[in-house]
Image (cartoon, grey):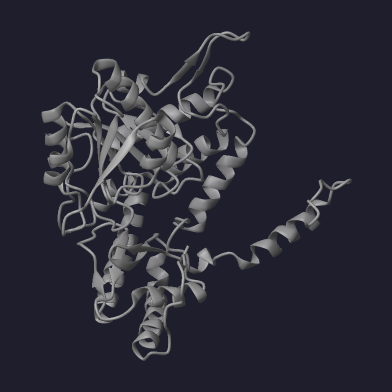
Amino acid sequence: MAERLQLPQQGVAWPQLKQSMLDMADGDVAWRDGKAAVYVFHSGDEVMQVAHDAYSMFIAENGLGPGAFPSLRQMEKDVVNMALSLQQAPAEGAGSMTSGGSESILLAIKACRDHVLSQRSVDGTPEILAPYSVHPAFDKGAHMMGLKVVRVPCGADFKADVEAMAAAVNNNTVMLVGSAPCFPYGLIDPIGDLSELALANNLWLHVDACVGGYLNPFMQAVLDEPLEPYNFSIPGVSSMSLDLHKYGYAAKGASTVLYRHKDLYRAQAFHFTDWPCGHMYTPTFAGTRPGGAIAAAWAVLNYLGREGYEQRAAQINSARCTLIEGCEGLGLQIYGQPKLSIVAFGWPHGDILAVGEGLYEAGWFSSRVTQPDGIQYMISPEHHKTMPNYLNVLEKYVNEVKQGARTRRQGDVSYS
């Protein structure tokens, strides 16, 4: 058994530590070169510097103590209000910043469970009814909080099959879910139809816009056709999750969870009084909340403004059109009709996962889908510069597979 690493007896000088960290990072994906189509949302060095500097200014401050740090309370309030405005929430809308999309989703599940079960009973385990494409964070939340996720197969268009979901509604159903867009295919579910289903059955409808929440409002300005409606402009939407550290371009980890009105939001919070320090209240799951993440999100939103976000949406749109045209030129198939930042594509006449393995080995990181097999590419603004290079590499591995020079390895190989 290898000896366990010990804390050094004496401290190590920063220059030496810095070099060690750079050495460890030498094998990381070269995201600055456009090789990461997942995990990093690069919108330019200037924006990253703003987030870095703002985070550093508040690196020690703690969002757990808004009385001690009213600056953070104001910044979070500003961020949430901007998010509510972008999502066309009514005047009584409310929400919080969180550590990421998973926490936003888990909080919405917690609020839904507590609010709904205070209004009515269920026959057994409360159920979340969702399309098969919904993010696994819903299963994580259900597992932690005593609920069950019922996943319904998507339609032929890779979107939620509302008729099939309607058939699955029962007395245990407490939440419906739709995505805007879903992570696997980058498609917006028919939220309007889900809203009608929710209203007809008095159900909570959550829209997972972790990917699209800070992209969709600006992408609309650069598209030739309207996006499908997906937010609080639809009357049946109860809550939304939207990530600041994705297309808000803020520092990790930062997200937002929003509610149609304050009564729903109140069910999210944790209150406790039976201990020596008196009342303990936290609006989110976390106790300590990094001030830097709040400050960086506030700074980036204000630094970019609507014009800056629309500029980056135009870059994403350009890169998406280039990617789709290039894939189709290689005989690959686009899944659905993606209009945002995610494109999933397969190969009707070849092994696309073998192509993906080649890309991975060459340092190009992306996710994959398996129903049907495909490569999922999540576009960042800076990819409009590197997309031609990606397509050249993609063509190389398509040709290798076509010629029999590359086959898929055995086993379950992840590309990311």
Looking at the image, residue 336 sits to the left or right of residue 239; the answer is left
Residue 10 visible, this angle: yes
Looking at the image, residue 96 sits to the left or right of residue 6; the answer is left
Residue 374 location, x and y as percent? 32, 68
Q: Is residue 15 above or below residue 149?
A: below
Query: What residue sits 62% from the left and 67% below the top?
Result: 27
Residue 305 location, x and y as percent? 37, 44
Query: What residue sits 54% from the left and 10% below the top?
Result: 279
* Frontmost residue, 145 versus 180: 145
Query: What residue sits 40% from the left and 66% below the top?
Result: 383
Looking at the image, residue 36 sits to the left or right of residue 313; the answer is right
Residue 130 location, x and y as percent? 25, 43
Quadrant in the picture for residue 141: top left
* Frontmost residue, 208 versus 245: 208
Q: Is residue 354 above or below residue 93?
A: below
Q: Which residue of the protein is positioned furthest toward the front in this rendering?
A: 124
Residue 318 visible, this angle: no
Looking at the image, residue 134 sits to the left or right of residue 144; the answer is left
Quadrant in the picture for residue 125: top left
Q: How many marks?
A: 0
Q: Which residue of the protein is positioned furthest toward the right in this rendering?
A: 10
* Frontmost residue, 131 versus 50: 131
Query: What residue sits 29% from the left and 71% below the top?
Result: 346
Residue 124 location, x and y as percent? 28, 27
